[in-house]
Image (spheres, helix red, strand yellow):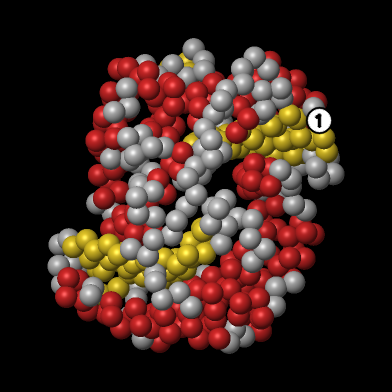
């Protein structure tokens, strides 16, 4: 079935449920392919922790008759790039290159998702690679603190477990079990492929149809357990100099009407060098080397976070400052700050719209989440429509939360400061 989304865009729905969006960019000689799977860490049981990420590694070890070297060389020999990533709700496969590479790109990406070999010997080797990745993440404090915060915010849930899994959970990933997991995770009806760039719907469909039509429908995973925000605390002491501090607040889902006001609030609070936190914590008081804020929306909830790297002795003073600055912004956001945040958001919006890789990733996400693509005019109007009252509303919701999650990772002296 075919339908038109934005002008010149074509969405094809295959009988097995997979959706293919073709997004032409006239005059462009390259393309970007983004295959988005609605499936990631949230869909794992505790025993399967890290399997989605392990599987993302494993499919590159052999698929569609090609081994690991052949898969890499096939793309790179023609000047292209290929990559993949695993998140809590999604897994992505991405290819970029000249238009002539598109047939091979579609073939390899569909092979990775539907025709991977998952050989036992390769699995043994790749588990060791992922274990090294786990060690690397642990050895990077300003990365590992976010795993600690995630655990504090979603205790006892899949969202609270690390995307990389653990050594113990990786041991349980035997070939047969991983094949069954792959069949459910990469179910066609949970996949959106978007191709942006110098392409036409007819050309892309002619290439894709023989690669996708023969893939049988699969049951796939059901919806994950609804998230529950838990205002936990985590403290990890190591023999390092800097303290890494992260705060987490219960926040909004992808579907919430206030998600754009919240993003603008985050930009004003800690989104750049002109943000309130950067100016007050770093520039005026020298309490932090780095400090920023962010929001992460999921389909059924979300989080708002603040991260700072500072001297351990400054943790109490910086913690107080962060909450004061947040409360002050929530009480009185200025028009000048709102205009700066809007300008930053709009600039990013238009820059991304002119980039094939950003378009493919954005449109794949929108189709997967909302079943549609938003026009630039729609998003720009929503940004322009945000007023100070909207910032006040979302800010007050955060400021009113007395129960927050917190993660601290730093030197032994943190023990007496973390109470």
**Residue drawn at point x = 33 percent, y = 80 percent:** 318
Tell me the quadrant of the picture where the C terminus can be found. Answer: bottom left
The reply, left or right, for residue 354 in relation to residue 188 is: right
Residue appearing at x 63%, y 60% in the figure: 256
Sort mark 1 into few (<14), some (14-19) or many (20+) by Cα contacts within 10 Å: few
- Residue 101 sits in which quadrant? top right
Q: Which residue is drawn at 81% across and 45% down?
A: 6
Residue 168's x, y, as percent?
Answer: 24, 35
> Is the N terminus in the top left, top right, bottom left or bottom right quadrant?
top right
Residue 240 appears left or right of 39: left
Relative height, residue 146 to residue 70 (above, below)? below
* Res. 299 in view: yes
Residue found at x 56% / y 25%: 219
Quadrant of the image occupied by residue 21: top right
Residue 43 x, y percent position in the rendering: 46, 39
Q: Position of residue 145 (x, y in %)?
A: 32, 59
Q: Give the residue number, with chain letter if any, for mark 1.
A: 2
Dot 1 lies on which element?
A: strand
Position of 151 relative to 215 (above/below) = below
212 horizontally vs 137: left or right? right
Front residue of 144 and 187: 187
Q: Where is residue 79 in the image (x, y as percent from the top left)?
A: 56, 31
Q: Look at the image and tell me whether residue 307 can be seen.
A: no
């Amino acid at each position: 079935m075919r339908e038109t989304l934005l002008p010149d865009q074509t969405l094809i729905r295959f009988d097995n449920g997979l959706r293919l969006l073709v997004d032409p960019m006239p005059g462009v000689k390259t393309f970007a392919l983004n295959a988005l799977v609605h499936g990631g860490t949230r869909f794992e049981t505790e025993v399967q922790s890290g399997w989605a990420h392990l599987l993302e590694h494993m499919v590159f070890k052999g698929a569609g008759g090609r081994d690991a070297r052949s898969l890499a060389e096939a793309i790179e020999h023609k000047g292209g790039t290929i990559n993949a990533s695993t998140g809590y709700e999604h897994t992505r496969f991405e290819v970029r290159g000249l238009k002539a590479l598109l047939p091979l790109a579609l073939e390899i990406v569909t092979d990775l998702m539907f025709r991977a070999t998952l050989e036992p010997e390769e699995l043994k080797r790749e588990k060791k690679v992922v274990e090294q990745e786990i060690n690397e993440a642990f050895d990077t404090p300003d990365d590992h603190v976010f795993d600690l915060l995630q655990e504090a915010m979603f205790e006892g849930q899949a969202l609270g477990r690390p995307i990389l899994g653990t050594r113990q959970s990786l041991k349980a990933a035997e070939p047969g079990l991983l094949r069954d997991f792959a069949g459910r995770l990469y179910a066609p009806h949970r996949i959106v492929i978007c191709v942006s760039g110098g392409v036409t719907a007819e050309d892309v469909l002619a290439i894709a149809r023989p690669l996708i039509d023969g893939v049988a429908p699969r049951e796939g995973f059901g919806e994950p357990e609804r998230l529950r925000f838990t205002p936990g605390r985590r403290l990890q002491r190591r023999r390092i100099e800097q303290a890494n501090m992260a705060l987490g607040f219960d926040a909004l889902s992808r579907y919430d009407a206030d998600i754009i006001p919240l993003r603008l609030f985050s930009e004003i609070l800690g989104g750049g060098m002109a943000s309130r936190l950067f100016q007050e914590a770093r520039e005026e008081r020298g309490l932090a080397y780095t400090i920023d804020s962010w929001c992460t929306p999921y389909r059924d909830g979300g989080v708002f976070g603040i991260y700072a790297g500072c001297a351990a002795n400054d943790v109490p003073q910086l913690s107080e400052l962060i909450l004061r600055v947040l409360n002050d912004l929530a009480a009185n956001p200025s028009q000048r700050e709102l205009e700066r945040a809007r300008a930053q958001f709009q600039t990013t919006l238009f820059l991304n719209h002119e980039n094939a890789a950003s378009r493919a990733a954005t449109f794949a996400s929108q189709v997967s989440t909302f079943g549609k693509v938003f026009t630039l005019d729609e998003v720009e109007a929503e940004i322009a429509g945000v007023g100070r009252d909207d910032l006040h509303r979302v800010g007050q919701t955060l400021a009113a939360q007395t129960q927050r999650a917190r993660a601290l990772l730093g030197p032994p002296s943190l023990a007496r400061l973390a109470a």
